[in-house]
Amino acid sequence: MIFLLATSLYLLTANPIHCSITTNYYQSLINQRTTEALGYKLPTSNNEFKQGVETENFEEYGEFDFVIVGAGSAGSVLATRLSEIDDFKILLLEAGNEEDDFSEIPAMWLYNQFSEKNWGYYTIPQKQSCLGMNNKQCVVPRGKLLGGSSSINGVMYSRGNCKDYDKWYQIGNRGWSSKDVLPYFKKSENSQIRGDKNYHGKGGFWNVEYSAPDSPLFQNFINGSIERNQPIVDYNGKNQIGASHLQSNIKHGKRQSLATAFLDNSRQRTNLKILTKTLVTKVVIDPQSKQAKGVEFVTRNKKFHVRATKEVIVSAGAINTPQLLMLSGVGPKDELSKLKIPIIADLPVGKNLIEHPRLMLMVRSDHAASKIGINKLIQQYLNGFGTLTQAGNVEGVGYIQTKNDSNEVPTIEILFTVPPYIDTSIYQRQLNYNKDVTNSLLDRIDPQKDIFFYIVLLHEKSRGRVSLNSSSPIDFPNIDLNMFAEQEDVETLFEGVEYVQNLLSTEAFKKINASLLEVPICANFKIGSKEYLECLIRNLAGTLYHPCGTAAMGPNNGNFVVGDTLEVHGVGNLRVVDASIFPSSISGHLNAPTVMVAEKAADLIKKEHKCL
Ligand SMILES: Cc1cc2nc3c(=O)[nH]c(=O)nc-3n(C[C@H](O)[C@H](O)[C@H](O)COP(=O)(O)OP(=O)(O)OC[C@H]3O[C@@H](n4cnc5c(N)ncnc54)[C@H](O)[C@@H]3O)c2cc1C
Ligand SMILES: *[C@@H]1O[C@H](CO)[C@@H](O)[C@H](O)[C@H]1NC(C)=O
Ligand SMILES: *[C@@H]1O[C@H](CO)[C@@H](O)[C@H](O)[C@H]1NC(C)=O
Ligand SMILES: *[C@@H]1O[C@H](CO)[C@@H](O)[C@H](O)[C@H]1NC(C)=O
Ligand SMILES: *[C@@H]1O[C@H](CO)[C@@H](O)[C@H](O)[C@H]1NC(C)=O
């Protein structure tokens, strides 16, 4: 009822109040960028910075209290919070460039991955996963622009389960239990949703709203979930397990990256200096005192050295943070000595790489969405609704406990997507699927009719690793996701598939004749058998783009990289603040938890330097 009301309201305001100049501008922007993306060649190294790296002389860039590496989700929040203190002088260094009108359109999210807004990483060839990808390599997109990965991501707002943070606390991290972190989730939030009382923030910098209107299929998802005994919940509220409407980081339909939400409020401050198109190549650490003193960076073909009088904070994300630490002498001793990098601290940097593997199931139904022209879609977007305001057409979310587990943490997440799709041309590049898979799977997609169920493994047992390929900051690191190394992970995904099969057998889905599309890629196995499903998983599963854990937080016992104040063990004046510090997996998406970490870090830092 509420959904219906909202829909008709939106339709009433859908008059083309924006002049055709604006519509034409967006139409040619979309035409141009989507075409470019299909042919864009991803870089294989940081060659754009080569000339600067190879320059002989350093120029001095002066002195700041804090130098922050990376203006991604965490860096944008941290720079904004620290610069609230007038006495703090802050330098924020970012390898990429600015956001723009195109990256702001949520539905164009995939195309950003084939532009200079993505670092362009792939895994090293995999042995037990990614087998249906070209050269058995999965993509590892990472945002390279202000806002970092939040500027190219799927705008889904999900915090995870309170038990996830209680586990962080149980590992030995004081101040990180669910009770401790809830205020920091609420602090950043400006919630527009019908959520649970006491669990949402109002008036924060970061907007959360529902995209609108709902597809008619959304109600089939909700009804089917109810038939399967799932409660209907606010998954960011009191009870996470059940089915929900997706909550998104959009504002009147446009992407709310952390650069838009936070940095736009702080970048005019005189105590915050932001440098874009700047690669930090090393944290300078005094080998005697083991104190971080500053960083070296390259920008506009020149090489600089800058001093940090209080702290260096690394917020370069779960792939680049471990790379930069290792290049600076902080990492596993054996690996660094092989590359002749002088060791400052022997720590398990780059190990414990955690992902969220996800399998896509294609479902064909009788329901066909009507085709809407791009002009109309743009007009809707400019009025804050419609398909362009959604990334990946996701509307429904289910957090499911497949195992009879008393600890109340979901094992599987289901993402429910609805037609019409406007971005299918980029799917092959998105997934790096080889010819066989592309022909047998992607070419069969009907953009008006198909429903996708993404089945996400929330707590993988397998662990991957980020390691150095060389001692040069020009080379990309080696990324080994190592998904499905543990057979248990395959089997937990089976339970997710079974859940979707059961969902499809409900009245709500029978009504629309929904059925799974078979994939001929695994045709030598009996369809529906365990062997068939395992073949699908090892060939077709990608990730939810959620690497974390590569500089994990915990006690100084050899297993962790930073302590519960996020200071690197055994090194002074050096903190890590980003998704690298997650010690264990999250039952949700990573952006909100990363923002929470940065909010909390800002308070820890202010307290340490006596401003709180
Ligand atoms: C395609 C995609 C879709 C996703 N979808 C969602 C979603 O829907 N919901 C969700 O919650 N999460 C999603 N995520 C994950 C989420 O966006 C990330 O986990 C989160 O943004 C990580 O924040 P971070 O601060 O750790 O790193 P990032 O945001 O990646 O920031 C790191 C920053 O550091 C910069 N940098 C790195 N190295 C250097 C260097 N040496 N010198 C200078 N600058 C450097 C980078 O350019 C980047 O700007 C998605 C991620 C991707 C890539
Ligand atoms: C969902 O369930 C409600 C209540 O039983 C019913 O009125 C409605 O028609 C159902 N909708 C769909 C799409 O199944
Ligand atoms: C789950 O476990 C409880 C007790 O451990 C048991 O009573 C219950 O029957 C189990 N449920 C299922 C579905 O296996
Ligand atoms: C570095 O990468 C190249 C190309 O991907 C690979 O052949 C080589 O083995 C790697 N070296 C190390 C030390 O990882
Ligand atoms: C579903 O399929 C059956 C058999 O093919 C058909 O009779 C029925 O009309 C279909 N239902 C809908 C809603 O189209």
Image (spheres, helix red, strand yellow):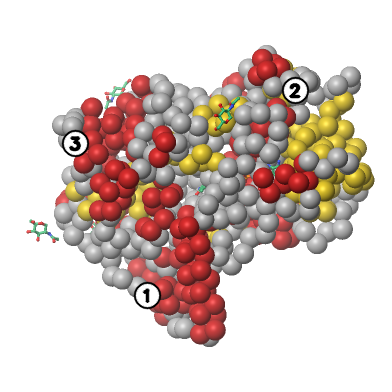
What's the distance in space between the residues labelled 3 and 1, CA to CA? 37 Å
Give the labeled residue for mark 1. Answer: 373
Q: Residues within 10 Å of mark 2 (few under 14, many from 20)?
A: some
- In the rendered image, residue 190, in percent from the top left (x then y), is placed at 60, 57
Q: Residue at x 89, y 19 (%)?
A: 288
Q: Amino acid at mark 1?
A: Gly
User: Residue 529 falls in which quadrant of the image?
Assistant: top left
Quadrant location, ligand no. 2: bottom left
- Bin the neighbour count of mark 3 within 10 Å (Cα to Cα): few under 14, some 14-19, many 20 and up: few
Asked whether mark 1 lies closer than 8 Å to ligand 5, one says no
Give SS at disc 1. loop
Mark 3 or 1: the one toward you:
3
Judging from the image, what secondary structure is the residue with disc 2 in? loop
Q: Distance of mark 1 from mark 2, alpha carbons?
A: 56 Å
Q: CA distance from mark 2 to mark 3?
A: 49 Å
Mark closer to the chain start, 3 or 1: 1
Name the foreground residue: 346 vs 609: 346
Kindly identify which residue carries mark 3: 523
Q: Nearer the viewer, residue 180 or 476?
A: 476
Report which quarter residue 280 is drawn in.
top right
Q: Earlier in the sequence, mark 1 or mark 2?
A: 2
| Res. 414 visible in picture | no
Dot 2 amino acid type? Ile
Tag in front: 1 or 2? 2
Q: Which residue is mark 2?
A: 341
Q: Amino acid at mark 3?
A: Ala
Residue 598 position within the rendered picture, expressed as x and y whole percent measured from the top left: 69, 42
